């Protein structure tokens, strides 16, 4: 026999992928100009020029065997050193090269971290709305994922519900800010609230509760909004970072895990991270990409493009009467559906060529996600369809 759970994961596509595939098929039937695909979070702005430049330099300057060979399992020493120094400079931390473990993106950072921490049987807690793959990643370790219900007015963390969710079985918390799917950045007050609760619970239960900060959207913020660096608020923090969105490199698979230097049992946890990376068969993160990110530590994509898109879609939809928060980060707009059943609402939108994702997938029934990492022109062309959708409910 085979593994039924894996068979299920491999046969049932995610709602998001399903919509994306539908969009491609529909475009062939009715024409690409009549399909408005807001389903995927695939960056729409090109990688910064620094990335292309770095690839060219590396290919021309480094011996091929070194450039394309295995690196240390935890990542090239100079790359890890450079990343640690950059984090220290930005966030006044005291990380060293051995605080960093290079990975193939945030998904791997999370899978490795969860595997490193979990003995099976444990509980991890996250806050709705949340990235649906957290359930897959957590359950793959034998642990369970508990979801704190969302705070519908502002999508910050409901601290009363959060506190209720923490039990003696809680091994860790997964927080994601800027958030997919809401685009919300958790405020300093939220972070202080969350970390105070965790600190008290650790004392009460007599064991560490790890805070896993999933940060692929850290660099995608609009205006002067601060994204608190969780290591500065809570010692038992592990950062799962990725360059997928910050350098528009999702297909190249590169990211890292950073352990706070104040983490309880820090050396043991680092050994567990190395062990989990080994057990999961990652061997090492792509050598060329490790060197590319080292050369592009300070580069960001053209945030202006995303901001233009956000301003256009947020302005137009709220003017039509849709309800949503103006997101401070990431490239998602989280809109209240015009009926209780967001699936029915998204189905009706689909008839008009609008591919948007029902919030149920994110633990947020009654809402839907619009990914605005698309062309400005497509957003403009889609507005009459959004208007027609609104009219159809009147
Ligand atoms: N975490 C969140 C919140 C995401 O939105 C994504 C991707 O969209 C990931 C993790 C996975 O990112 P990566 O492509 O770096 O594995």
Image (spheres, rainbow, N blue to C red):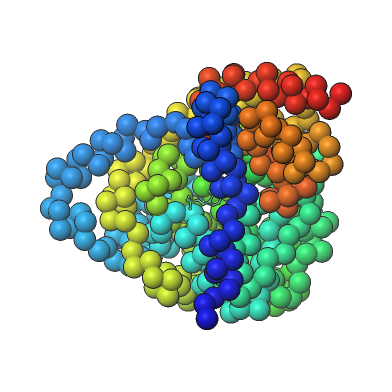
Which residue is at the far right? Answer: 394
Relative vertical location of residue 78 with respect to residue 117 in this rendering, above or below: above
Q: Nearer the viewer, residue 266 or 173?
A: 173
Report if residue 252 is visible in the image. Answer: yes
Q: Position of residue 125 (x, y in %)?
A: 69, 63
| Residue lying at 79% horizontally and 62% vertically, measured from the top left | 163
Q: Position of residue 314 (x, y in %)?
A: 67, 25
Q: Is residue 131 left or right of residue 111?
A: right
| Residue lying at 17% horizontally and 58% vertically, measured from the top left | 66
Relative vertical location of residue 335 with respect to residue 237 in this rendering, above or below: above
**Picture mark count:** 0
Q: Position of residue 324 (x, y in %)?
A: 74, 32
| Residue lying at 28% horizontally and 36% vertically, measured from the top left | 52
Q: Nearer the viewer, residue 13 or 321?
A: 13
Which residue is at the far front? Answer: 29
Q: Position of residue 129 (x, y in %)?
A: 70, 49
Q: In which image quadrant can residue 330 be found?
A: top right
Q: Is residue 371 left or right of residue 200?
A: left
Q: Nearer the viewer, residue 162 or 28?
A: 28
Relative vertical location of residue 137 with respect to residue 394 in this rendering, above or below: below
Q: Quadrant of the C terminus?
A: top right
Q: Nearer the viewer, residue 381 or 104?
A: 381
Q: In which image quadrant can residue 186 be found?
A: top right
| Residue lying at 54% horizontally and 76% vertically, measured from the top left | 3
Report if residue 294 is visible in the image. Answer: no
């Amino acid at each position: 026999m085979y593994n039924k759970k894996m068979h299920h994961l491999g046969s049932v596509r995610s709602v998001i992928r399903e919509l994306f595939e539908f969009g491609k098929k529909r475009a062939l039937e009715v024409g690409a100009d009549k399909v408005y695909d807001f389903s995927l979070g695939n960056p729409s702005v090109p990688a910064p020029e620094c990335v292309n430049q770095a690839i060219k330099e590396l290919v021309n300057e480094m011996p091929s065997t070194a450039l394309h060979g295995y690196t240390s399992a935890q990542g090239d020493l100079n790359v890890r050193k450079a990343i640690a120094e950059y984090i220290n400079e930005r966030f006044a931390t005291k990380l060293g090269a051995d605080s960093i473990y290079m990975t193939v993106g945030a998904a791997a950072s999370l899978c490795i971290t969860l595997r490193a921490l979990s003995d099976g049987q444990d509980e991890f807690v996250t806050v709705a709305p949340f990235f649906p793959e957290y359930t897959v990643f957590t359950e793959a370790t034998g642990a369970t994922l508990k979801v704190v219900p969302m705070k519908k007015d502002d999508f910050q963390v409901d601290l009363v519900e959060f506190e209720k969710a923490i039990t003696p079985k809680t091994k860790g918390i997964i927080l994601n800010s800027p958030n997919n799917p809401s685009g919300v950045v958790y405020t300093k007050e939220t972070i202080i609230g969350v970390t105070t609760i965790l600190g008290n619970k650790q004392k009460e239960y007599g064991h560490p509760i790890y805070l896993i900060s999933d940060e692929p959207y850290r660099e995608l913020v609009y205006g002067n909004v601060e994204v608190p660096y969780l290591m500065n608020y809570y010692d038992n923090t592990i950062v799962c970072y990725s360059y997928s969105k910050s350098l528009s490199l999702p297909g190249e698979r590169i990211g890292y895990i950073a352990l706070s230097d104040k983490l309880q049992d820090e050396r043991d946890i680092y050994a567990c991270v190395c062990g989990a990376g080994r057990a999961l068969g990652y061997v090492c993160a792509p050598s060329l990409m490790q060197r590319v990110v080292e050369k592009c530590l300070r580069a960001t994509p053209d945030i202006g493009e995303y901001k233009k898109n956000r301003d256009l879609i947020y302005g137009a939809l709220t003017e039509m009467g849709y309800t949503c928060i103006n997101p401070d980060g990431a490239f998602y707009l989280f809109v209240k559906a015009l009926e209780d059943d967001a699936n029915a609402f998204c189905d009706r939108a689909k008839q008009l060529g609008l591919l948007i994702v029902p919030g149920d997938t994110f633990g947020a029934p009654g809402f839907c996600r619009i990914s605005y990492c698309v062309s400005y022109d497509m957003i403009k062309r889609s507005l009459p369809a959004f208007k027609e959708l609104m009219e159809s409910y009147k």
